Image: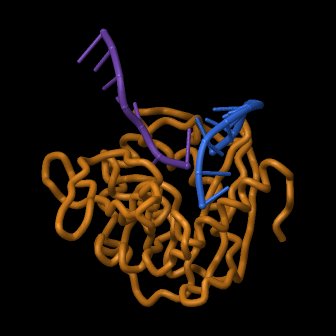
Chain colours: A orange, B purple, C blue
Amino acid sequence: MDTAWNRERFLKAQEALRNLTDSVRLGSVQWVAAFDVSFQGRRGYGVGALFDYETLAMSECYSVSFDAYVPYVPTFLAFREMPYILSIWKRFTRKPDLMLIDGHGLSHPRAMGIATQAGLACRTPSIGIAKKPLFGLELQTEEGTFLVHPETGERLAYVYKHKPRFNPVYISVGVGMDLSTAVNVVLKLFRGCREPEPLRAVHNVSLNEGRIGLHAV
DNA sequence: GCGACAG
DNA sequence: ATCTTGTCGC
């Protein structure tokens, strides 16, 4: 089975994808998709929704549920959660201009976090929003705090607190733009909470799907 | 060898 | 991510 866990194969897959990151470029943004997956044991509940970038009005929302094919292994999150995202992607009647993913993009040991892999798979610009660091050194500068590459010093993620008392989120490029663009785009999606509103919305739905068994239509 | 390690 | 009770604070 090609979905089975195999470290060597997954490593090679991630390395091969590095050659495709120029195939996607961000244009004007009207429709933003956000995705999240929650689990109860092996059972995964994936939710994805489409939002108007300016008003944040939700225009479509879908959920899927099936058993995960592989366990969670750090730096290989995409192989566990992407099947849910792709399954939802097919159901959108309009394709998003931008995808928001719960997790890292380029701030990953092989620059291939789930936001990057999902953006490439859907050939759509993407941004990763993570709640914990994964890779890189935290560095404070005049322009803010970043996760930087340990060897090259390249800025991999912006460490952002929407309010001073909040724990930060780590904003990284998935694919199709530079970091400053990703940050500018994402900062307009916050509405007073730790996370941007589209991700907060789908996260809440996926928790409900798993715990109460509601059904999105 | 040991610890760290998105969701 | 999920398991899991009470508890401190606005």
Q: Position of residue A197 (x, y in %)?
A: 58, 72
Looking at the image, residue A184 lies above or below residue A78: below
Q: How many labels does the image show?
A: 0
- Closest to the observer: A53 or A163? A163
A119 relative to A150, above or below: below
Name the quadrant of the N terminus of chain A.
top right
Furthest-left residue in this view: A152
Q: In the picture, residue A43 is in which quadrant?
A: top right
Figure quadrant of the C terminus of chain A: bottom right
What residue is at 61 percent from the left and 83 percent from the top?
A56
Q: Image check: C4 left or right of A55?
A: right
Q: Which residue is drawn at 63% across and 68% down?
A: A89
Q: Is residue A115 visible?
A: no
Residue A63 spot, x, y in % from top left: 75, 62
- Decide if residue A57 is on the left or right side of residue A99: right
State the residue at coordinates (25%, 50%): A138
Whether residue A79 is visible: yes
Q: Residue A3: x and y, percent? A: 58, 41
Q: Is residue A210 above or below residue A19?
A: above
